[in-house]
Image: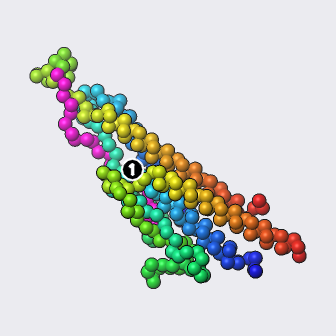
Amino acid sequence: MSFFTSLQVTGSALAAERLRVDLASANLANANSTRSVEGGPYRRRDAVFQATPLENGFGSELDRAVRAVTVPQIVIDQSPPREIFNPGHPDADERGIVQLPNVSVVEEIVNLRTAQRAYEANLSALGVSREMAQRALRIGRTA
Amino acid sequence: MPLISNPTTQILEHVLRFRDQRHDLIAANLANASTPGYRAFDLALNQALGDGPLSLQGSDPRHFATQSAASGRTVASNAPARLDGNNVSLEDELLKLLENRTLYQTAFELRDRLASLTGLARDVR
């Protein structure tokens, strides 16, 4: 256990929350994309967060409790697309219905906000880690 | 009172190790603030610092009593969980983070005072 442990853990969280912001932005950006490379309308993406013990631990109780965040998977939301009636749209079917992405703008905004808050909290932890490391480096120096 | 390796130095060393490890745990809780199903942990002192000589305690006789041994025991938080099974409270963890940092710096401050006393004694001679 050292300061690098907390830096490693906090760093993993910053990367994961950043990914969540990226995905929410991509979902919002494509909230009206009726075409995608997979065919059909865009489907919203979500990150799966997983608490993972650090690899360099000794397997003690503390090492098992201190866990970093990993994103093992990015899942595609399988909920049905939104449907609107718009016969003039080039992607409308024979009944005049257009399939729009299953993106809920409100849900994505909430995701953005919670990710931002978690990111800020981790930045605070990073600041404190740095401060503590610097204090420890000053040990033995005359004040 | 011996100035070098006196009981206060040992206690301060113990405190610093405890604060360092507790900081790791709090940082891990904050890191997992969005992980579904994650339960928060905290580190509790094995014994009050005033209760006789300090020794590293293991919960199992096979544990090594080394310098890197945990200076406390991990306690799972029983705070109510959110809908996704996570029970990390950002506010609580940030408060613990600041409290822990302050006590860490206090221990260092005390250690510096002690060191300057040692220096004084040397200068007197």
Q: Which residue is mark 1?
A: B34
**What's the coloring here?**
rainbow
Looking at the image, can residue A57 be seen? Answer: no
Assess whether residue A79 is covered by the magenta stretch: yes
Q: Residue furthest bottom?
A: B61
> Which quadrant would residue B50 be assigned to in this image?
bottom right
Looking at the picture, how far across and down is residue A24, in whole percent? 36, 37
Q: Is residue B67 above or below residue A18?
A: below
Looking at the picture, how far across and down is residue A118, in whole percent? 45, 46
User: In the structure shown, which secondary structural element does the residue marked by tag 1 occupy?
Assistant: loop
Q: Is residue A71 above or below residue B74?
A: above
Q: Residue furthest right?
A: B125
Looking at the picture, how far across and down is residue B68, in whole percent? 55, 72
Assess whether residue A92 is covered by the magenta stretch: no
Q: Is residue B46 above or below residue A123?
A: below
Q: Is residue A57 above or below residue A13?
A: below
Looking at the image, can residue B121 be seen? Answer: yes
Q: Nearer the viewer, residue A76 or B121?
A: B121
Residue type beneath disc 1: Ser
Tell me the residue at 21%/31% (across/down): A82
> Which quadrant would residue B48 be assigned to in this image?
bottom right
Q: Residue furthest top?
A: A88
Tell me the residue at 79%/70% (across/down): B117
Location of the C terminus of chain A (image quadrant) = bottom right
Q: Residues within 10 Å of mark 1 (few under 14, many from 20)?
A: many
Q: Residue furthest left?
A: A95
Tell me the residue at 19%/25% (across/down): A84
Which residues are the magenta region? A62-85
Looking at the picture, how far across and down is residue A94, in whole percent? 11, 22
Tell me the residue at 65%/62% (across/down): B106
